[in-house]
Amino acid sequence: MQLTDFDVLKQANIWFEQQKMFWMCTIIGTYGSAPRPIGSIFITDGKQRVGSISGGCLEDAFVDMLERGEFEQHDQIFVYGKHLDEPNVVRELPCGGTIRLLVEPMRQNEDNRQHLHQWLTTAEAKQPCQRVIDLSSKTSHKQLVMLENETAQVIGETASTITLTYGQVWSILLLGIGQVTQHVAELGIMAGYDVKLCDMRKELADSWSFTKARGGVDIEWRSPDDFIEQYANERSAVLALAHDPRIDDVGLMTVFETDAFYIGAMGSSRTSANRRERLSRICGFTESEFKRLHAPIGLPIGSKTPVEIAIAILADIIRVRNGKGE
């Protein structure tokens, strides 16, 4: 799950407490081009819309069908597209793809209230979980199952049951405050990442305005190695952006021991070469280990300004996360 879906869950809980009837749509399958990943959620009360399952066309069509009285009875699977040989297919997306949706009318009852509340609480705690929806009767039963470890399978499906797995969120760990750091934090939060930041240079505290109170992230005043040891995992991108060896090098000395999917450090080609020499000399890192390091950081788009550099950095993180080549 991305953090962008948290807003959908929060609004779903608000609507439920306001005694509103609404519908939740979850993507359970795609074919061809599709703008949103499996597991993405969207809710609507027929007027207001929160979340996204397409670029807008599917949301429009869904609301139109609600106005015609469809999807009011019980949880069901709906296929939007012409490629699958099923009787309830309507038409394909403009991009040529097909989307299968789990459609859940969220009626006012205690089971739905507890389910939504537990799901939001679990998501906020970044705890992996599974939603199990029984479609075998018109009074569909929903269950939330806590997971100790994540499973590679996002969707499980039988003739009567849908299982949706929500793993831990992806994170961006920032070393060192600065203009580029702020823009990366802003973009990362908008893209649905859990963003954390550390520094040790308290004399720079007044230069950081993108605090949690303003929708951003607060600085953790601590050593980068401790910061990385606590937070870095296989879903983390670790970015050394301080342009100060006291911060960047200390963090990089630790991060190669983690499973971070992306390691990047800001600096010119000369700065990056000098950094590699220092780390090789001090820590004995090999060329094989340095292959994990993206330095100079970011896609080579000719970026010069802080915001352009931040865009290049986040784009490269997304590229690596999605398994796309150079």
Image (spheres, rainbow, N blue to C red):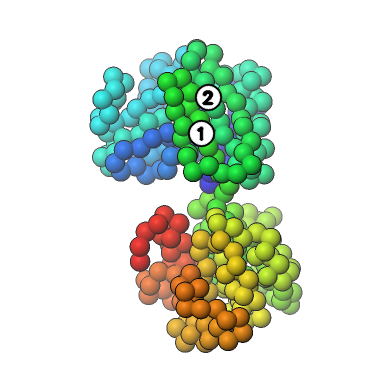
Residue 131, image x, y percentages? 56, 31
Which of 244/323 is in front? 323
Q: Secondary structure at mark 2?
A: strand
Question: What's under tag 2, amino acid-wise?
Answer: Ile
- Rendered image quadrant of residue 59: top left
- Rendered image quadrant of residue 229: bottom right
Q: What residue sits 67% from the left and 56% below the top?
A: 212
Q: Name the residue tied to disc 2.
A: 133
Q: Residues within 10 Å of mark 2 (few under 14, many from 20)?
A: many
Of the 4 image quadrants, the one containing the C terminus is: bottom left
Give the vertical position of 229 relative to 166 (above or below). Answer: below
Sequence-first tag of 1 and 2: 2
Q: Is residue 225 left or right of residue 46?
A: right
Q: Is residue 233 visible?
A: yes
Residue 82: image tag: none
Q: Residues within 10 Å of mark 1 (few under 14, many from 20)?
A: many
Q: What residue sits 54% from the left and 13% below the top?
A: 139
Residue 161, image x, y percentages? 48, 23
The answer to whether marks 1 and 2 mark residues whose Cβ atoms lie closer than 8 Å is: yes
Give the CA separation, mark 1 to mark 2: 8 Å
Q: What residue sits 29% from the left and 41% below the top?
A: 32
Q: Is residue 186 visible?
A: no
Residue 9, image x, y percentages? 58, 36
- Rendered image quadrant of residue 121: top right
Q: Secondary structure at mark 1?
A: strand
Question: What's under tag 1, amino acid-wise?
Answer: Leu
Residue 164: image tag: 1
